[in-house]
Image (tube, grey):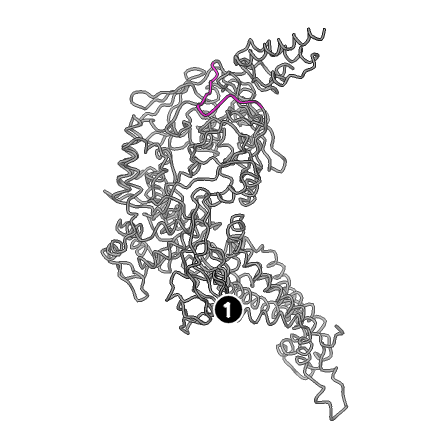
Amino acid sequence: MKTKYTLLFSLLVIASMLIASCGGTQTAAPATDQPVEPVATEKPVEPVATEAVSAFGEAPALAEQVAAGTLPPVEERLPDTPVVTVADYAEIGKYGGTLYSASWWPEVGNVQLYFAVEAPVKWKADLTGYEPGLVESYEWSEDGKTFTMHMRPGLKWSDGEPYTTADWKFWWEDFAKNPDQKLWSIPAYLRNADGSPIDMEFPDDYTIVWKSKDRGLWVDPYFMAQGFWEFAKNFMKPAHYLKEYHPAYTTSGKTWEDFANQDKWWQTPGYPCLFAWCLTELSSDGQNYTFTRNPYYWRVDGDGNQLPYIDAVSVEIVSDEQTRILNCSQGKYDTAFRICGGPNEIPFLQENAAAGGYHFLENYMNGAGAWPGYMVNQDYVEGGKNYEDDTPEHAKEIRDLLRDAKFRQALSMGFDRQRVIDVAWGGIADVKNYTLSPQSWHFTGADGQAVYKKWAENFINFDADAFNALLDEIGMEKGADGFRNLPSGKAFELVIDISDWGGSLKVQVDASEEMKKQWETNLGIKVKINNLQGQPDLDTRTNEGYFMLRGAHISEIDILTYPDWLFPVVNRYYFPLEGRWFAKGGDACAEEPTDTNKYPCGLKPEDGSPAQLLQALYNKARETSTEQGRHEVVWEAINIHIEQGPFVIGVAGDQPMPIIVKDYMRNILDFGVVGPWAPSTPGNQIAALWWMDK
Amino acid sequence: MTVVEQTTPAAPAKQKQVSQSYWALVWWKFKRNRIAVLGGILLLSFYFGFVFIPEFLSPYELNHTSDFVEAPPTKLHFIDTEGKFHLQPFVYGMERKLDFKTRARTYVEDTTRMYPISLFIHGDEYKLLGFIPSDLHLYGVDQKANPEAIVLIMGADALGRDWFTRILYGGRLSLMIGLIGQVMTIIFGMTLGVMSGYYGGMIDQVIQRTTEFLNAFPDIPLFMALAAAIPTFWSPIAVYFMLTIILSFVRWGGLARQVRGLILSLREREYVLAAKSAGASDARIMFRHLLPGTMSHVIVIATLAIPGMILSETALSWLGLGLRAPLTSWGVLLQDAATVRAIHTTPWELWTVPFILVTILAYNMLGDGLRDALDPYGTR
């Protein structure tokens, strides 16, 4: 009897191993873990054998629910053609585990970036461009005015309802275009050139067509790939779930306010989502978020196992950065992207790595084109009370100076960048002028690299004779106090606004103090530092054009979806008012100035000014049909920045970032750029592939 | 506390030696309290050192930056590598090493270079008290002969500035601003408290209700709103000074209440009646006769409240309100040291803490002693 059972048992083991290696079941784990008692053999093996019929594996917890009849079988949950997800850095993983991480604000955006970024269009893992994500494919018409997306048939929300154009239609017609709702306004990339919304058509259950009547939509679909805030927050609306909260459909008298409260997928447990994990639990104090596996997730691994491997993602709100850094050093977080401080924390975290059981992902860069950099306001106007005589005439004089390329060149050459790096960055960073992120897809290829190099090395030589000659040329004479005056002879003080931009107040404070010292001694320009951290007028001073210089952190991979750093097309950064003019529709804007808002329509760029050229190039890029063609337009714009700039005084760039993961974490690609949030690192890789080897 | 009645009558001849004024008795009693005297001496020397002569006490000027970024405190040596003893202490030269892998920056002593430390040495130029030009420093290394030498007894900050120098200069702002704000509060509180207590009736009602109204203002939001309303061309010191004055307008309420309470009991005393009968004016009665009676209380409140002012400067700076970098005050310095990185990499930045602690302790010791001394007939 005993030998018979043993034989039967070993046969079953061999059989199950074979099945497992053929990719039939969850993993090979159950076979090797079999208990020796023969009694236990029959039952566990049986379901394995039946499951071998199905081509797909699933998590043990889901298999139990299927067996209990509370969940449909895996092949019914997956879309008609599940997305087989393989990557050269990934192996077949094991199910299980809860991933612990932290965030500092209730939107938990840094964790949303792990998985809530699987929009219809998504970034490629290597950040060299875009690929279809949630949708099967997409294409443009010849003239670019029509953009068509083909959804995946059979793809379902996390509650099992099918995801179809009905959801899109609900979003577009009942929400976005609804004049009664004031929660969200249709962004510029979904509008025609004349400002009206584009047309969206839904010919069948799985086809979405965007149509513009007057402009090409070549760039606009890429906006959906930016971070978690475009698609997940604004486009992902489960019609069957939200209709009850929509005033037009509600049966219980719900208002738009109720809709707004409910329509937060990351804060409303049970909100159907399309990602690998959906929110199932939010602690009553709002400090702990649990995102649990989506049983209807649409990706499978190379062996047909439904992803994700990890059961749940648990996020704790820790608003104090120093506490998070200590937690990181003690290995409390399984993955820590963007929560363990900046480059200057690396030595401390490295010392504790062995004790904390974690290691660094060393190829994660900040992607900073300038950190710090000093934006030079090209639209300086009165109103900032930077001096007693705050009149339009005085402001114009300063604006003319800030717009003088020679002045900006003198500022850029008038300090020793390595010394600032010693002060702010522990001596380690690239000496460079401001650029976009060095990893930007605009810089791929030899031509792109050449443009990048030329830009980064523009006016960075520390040359005392050259910059003093430039300032003399402008007519800035030195006064009795040894500081240079304005060309008119009025006293001049350069005000630098600083804040914790880039994530570190200390870096900005230390660097700006060093800049002050160097500009004062080298150039003879009097400098005042205006530390605005935590002050309510910080952004007003930037957007209304009240600042002269402002310490910043510059990084961007795709400048056409976030044009602010290169093109003056939004009310922001160093062309605040000319950008506002463009964003408000140019001459069409008819808002009347008031005492508190003197330039509601911004400032019209002068003919031939860099702002005008750059705005024209932005329009040109949006009408360019090929990727290469658009890169070339970007290079053209960069050339304006090289020749008529610098518009930002860049100091240093591209620091490595302390990204740490526990030693048992697997399948995490060691490449990413965490400074700019739009490329969604680490969500540009597929976090559903991560697993825990413990 | 009622002084006049207590002096014993008769006993002619010897009386002159025994009968001392109230303040002389206070002074005698105060002197016997060693701890209070120590607190007083500490405070006097702090105020003298930090407010009037930090330029002289520090080896460098406040904005003297150097290549020794975040260098640890330099070690003072008496014995050189060959075992020879030097009466004059010296420091070795320092060299910076950078580990590109761990990003750690370390400094090692270069024992081939020796720089003696001298007292009363010529260095950075400054203007003592704002008008006496000088370049004399209490201690330091000869910068003219050895520009590459540096002595940092409490290490250096991120710009390579001497931390001890920054503490000295920071003390000036922290100590002065606390004091000025407190003096204003006391003046308002006392005057209004006396009036309130003495006149009673309508005036009392108005002042007391105003106090309650003002007490309802929360400090920090008020601070934020005011900070935003003040123009940028003001220097940050002026801004903060303005804010402390505004705060003293808001904070006098508590003190005014206490003074009013004391006056309510004092005004029933016979000597007030006597003064009234003699035809003294209300002002004379209030400020000449009544107010001195509350002084012991007020002085104690003040000495104990000034540390509060210093701490609130520190706390507000720490929150990013109040004084902010690039100004140097103890609060700002403390903010620098309040990170994991600072404690790990630059622990010497915590040197600010003992200075704040000792100042506050000294104020409390003094206040305690004063409270006892101002009641010279008490048994303690």
At 45% from the left and 16% from the top, the residue drawn is A205
Indicate the quadrant where residue A230 lies.
top left
Question: Residue extending furthest bottom?
Answer: B13
Element type at mark 1: helix
Name the foreground residue: B116 vs A405: B116
- Vertical side of B192 occupied by A486: above or below: above
Q: Which is more toward the observer, A202 or A96?
A: A96
Rendered residue at 32%/34% (across/down) = A443
Residue A572's place in the image compared with B232, above or below, is: above
Quadrant where the C terminus of chain B sits is bottom right
Is A371 in front, or is B140? B140
Residue reaching furthest to the front: B82
**Residue type, numbered disc 1:** Val
Q: Residue B94's x, y, as percent?
A: 43, 57
- Side (left or right) of A95 relative to A394: right
Within 10 angstroms of label 1, few (less than 14), some, or many (20 or more) residues? many
Instruction: Depth check: give the residue in front, A318 or B6.
Output: A318
The answer to whether residue B241 shows anywhere in this view is: no
Q: Is residue A104 visible?
A: yes
Give percent across and percent down for residue A664. 55, 30
Can you tell which quarter of the image residue B9 is in? Answer: bottom right
Where does residue A657 sit, x and y in percent of width and height?
A: 45, 39
Q: Main secondary structure of the magenta part?
A: loop
Q: Which residue is mark 1?
A: B51
Which stretch did the figure color magenta?
Answer: A81-95
Task: Name above or below for residue A56 compared with residue B307.
Answer: above
Residue A47 is one of the magenta-drawn residues: no
Look at the picture and state if A462 lies above or below B141: above
Q: From the image, which quarter does the N terminus of chain B lie in?
A: bottom right
Pointer 1 chain = B
- Tell me residue A692's x, y (percent): 56, 27
